[in-house]
Amino acid sequence: MRLADKVAIITGSGSGIGRATAELFAEEGAKVVVADINLEGANQTVQSIRTAGGEAISVEADVSKEGDSCNVADLTCSEYGKIDILVNNAAAFVFGRVEDATSEDWDRILSVNVKGPAFCVKAVIPAMKQEGSGAIVNIGSISSIIAQPDYVPYNTSKSAVLNFTRCLAMDLAPLNIRVNTVCPGVTHTPALEKFMEEEGMTLEEVSSRLNQPCLLKRLGKPREIAHGILFLASDDASFVTGTSLLVDGGYTAQ
Ligand SMILES: NC(=O)c1ccc[n+]([C@@H]2O[C@H](COP(=O)([O-])OP(=O)(O)OC[C@H]3O[C@@H](n4cnc5c(N)ncnc54)[C@H](O)[C@@H]3O)[C@@H](O)[C@H]2O)c1
């Protein structure tokens, strides 16, 4: 088991990629703190982990609120005694052209996707420092790297994640805390289902049109992204920091 005796906080793990990651981490022996703004979703993830024989607790938290991030770190330490891993997975999805984005849109996307991870990292540093080690995985996207039509707010926030990761890797290396990013390609999650509904697109249209550059010609599965996150969070990646791993079926290869 690659995460035996490890304690992991995963934000946004009440759904999609976060849930798949929480389930995989628990299978690999981690005690998982399932933090989500949607407590019902978080409870479902915990239920699924416990049914499979794993260990997890849920906590309601809005990562854009610094106090909530502190509560998650405090709860983790009081329940499990330490924090080894943080996965910054929670995200808001605000798309559109720059002419359409309101001040509220910008506040929302930057608060959840950029300030949120920063608050969570700040909250876990004392416990990781005390432990003498730590691994942080931030979730970016192919949208961190490429331009996509009518995606300005989301892609701006996701590109910030890459340099956030590099700067943190530099500052936290003396504390033996590694920081990396996983950049998923188009993945079949509830967020994608919602996008399809809003855009009036079918699954076939998403696969063939939106996901056209994907070399493997299919959507990713949350579990496939979770395996990339597991690698960077585990000691298998003990000499890896400040980098990003694309798990995108070759979308960005050409
Ligand atoms: N699905 C894709 O195609 C895709 C592609 C690239 C990157 N990503 C990234 O993967 C991550 C997970 O996406 P997903 O598709 O699984 O989404 P999802 O909507 O299925 O899950 C996101 C979870 O985050 C939670 N959340 C939202 N705002 C929050 C907040 N302020 N505080 C705490 N929790 C909050 C939601 O309640 C939800 O449970 C995101 O960072 C997303 O940007 C997804």
Image (cartoon, helix red, strand yellow):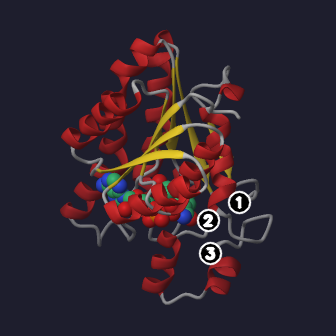
Instruction: Decide if ligand 1 comes within 8 Å of the CB at mark 1.
Output: no
Q: Quadrant of residue 178?
A: top right
Ligand 1 sits in which quadrant? Answer: bottom left
The residue that mark 2 highlights is 186
Which comes sooner in the sequence, label 2 or label 3?
A: 2
In the rendered image, residue 31, in percent from the top left (x then y), is placed at: 51, 38
The amino acid sitting under disc 1 is Tyr
Q: What residue is drawn where x is 45% and y is 18%?
A: 172
Q: Is residue 81 above or below residue 34?
A: above
Report the quarter where the C terminus lies: bottom right
The residue that mark 3 highlights is 210
Q: What residue is drawn where x is 49% and y is 36%?
A: 8
Q: Are marks 1 and 2 in contact (CB under 8 Å)?
A: yes
The answer to whether residue 78 is left or right of residue 238 is left
Q: Is residue 196 above or below residue 158?
A: below
Q: What residue is drawn where x is 32% and y is 33%?
A: 73
Residues at marks 3 and 1, CA–CA distance in whole angstroms: 11 Å
Q: Is residue 211 visible?
A: yes
Instruction: Decide if ligand 1 comes within 8 Å of the CB at mark 3.
Output: no
Q: Are marks 2 and 3 in contact (CB under 8 Å)?
A: yes
Q: What residue is drawn where x is 37% and y is 21%?
A: 127
Q: Is residue 32 above or below residue 60?
A: above
Residue 26: assigned label: none
Secondary structure of residue under mark 1: loop
Label 1: few (<14), some (14–19) or many (≥20) C-alpha neighbours in 10 Å? some
Secondary structure of residue under mark 3: helix
